[in-house]
Amino acid sequence: MIAFGGAAPLHAARMGQKLGIERVVIPVDAGVGSAHGFLDAPIGYEVARTFLLALDGLDPRVVEHLFRDMRAEAEAVVRLGVPAGLLAERRTGFMRYRGQGHEIAVPLDDAALDPAALRGAFEAAYTRLFGRIIPGLEIEAVTWTLALSEPYALPPADPRVEETAPAVAQGTRRMVEADSDRAIDAPVYGRGTLMPGATLRGPAAIVEDGTTTIVPTGFGARIGHGGEIIIEGDAA
C-alpha cells in the first residue's frame, strides 16, 4: 500500500495491518504527493469523442478518421511541451452490450478497427472483468479516446541497500498506542536525517514538513534507495 497526503502516513501501518497488507510505502514528500505527481508526470493530453456505433456493419474508415482527428488535436497540445521526438499513443473504446447502462474500457492499441477485431477486443476485456461473455447480443461503442504523451519509463524496482548511516533519534514524543491505549514516550526521527538503508523499530515517529509517519510497536521501517519509507510488520 502506498500512503501519501498529510494524514495517511499517520495511520497507514495499522490500516495495512487490518487489510492484511504486509508492506506499506511512504514516498518522498508524501504530504504533497499529488503536486509531486503532477510535476513528475509526462506531458500528455487525452481527447474523447462520443460517437455511438454498432460494431456489426461498422466502417473501419470512419473510426480511423475519428482517431486521426483526435491525434491531430492531441499532438497540437503535446508538442507545445515536447517539440520533437516520438510520442506514446493509447487508444481506448468504451463499449457495451446493447441495452446495458454502462460501458467498459477496451484497449485498442493492438486491435484493428474492423468489426471482428473490435468484437474480439471487447469480449477479451469483458471476460477479464466478468469471467464470461453474453453470446448473441449486439455490441456498440459509445465513446472513443486517444491519449498522447511523451514516452515515460517507470523507475527500477527497489534494490535492498546496506545501511549507510544509523538512524539517530532527535528526541521523544508522547504517543498513545492504538492497541493498548497506553501512553508511551516514542523516539522521534527527522526524515531528512535518515539515509538509504537506515532501519528503525517501532514505536517511533518520523517527522517532516508535510506529514508525520507513525511506526507502531511490532513494525519496522527501512529507508529505500529512493528515500521512501518502507514499513513492514514483524510477521512480514
Image (spheres, grey):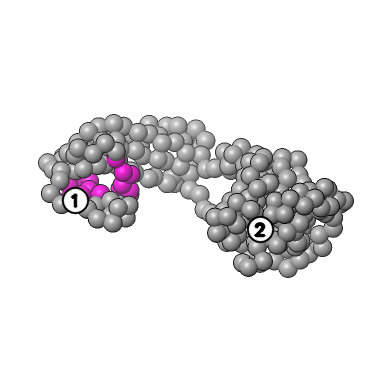
Point out the image quarter for the C terminus.
Answer: bottom right
N-term-proximal mark, 2 vs 1 = 1
Q: Is residue 176 above or below residue 200?
A: above
137 displayed left or right of 4: left
**Circle number at residue 126:** none
Whether residue 108 is in magenta: the answer is yes
Relative image position of residue 161 (x, y in whole percent):
69, 66
* Quarter of image, res 87: top left
Q: Residue at x 40, y 40 (%)?
A: 147
Q: Which residues are magenta?
A: 103-122
**Circle number at residue 134:** 1
* Residue that badge 2 annotates: 230
**Mark 2 closeness class: few <14, some 14–19, many ≥20 residues within 10 Å:** some
Relative image position of residue 234 (x, y in whole percent):
67, 66
66 displayed left or right of 21: left
Q: Residue at x 51, y 39 (%)?
A: 43
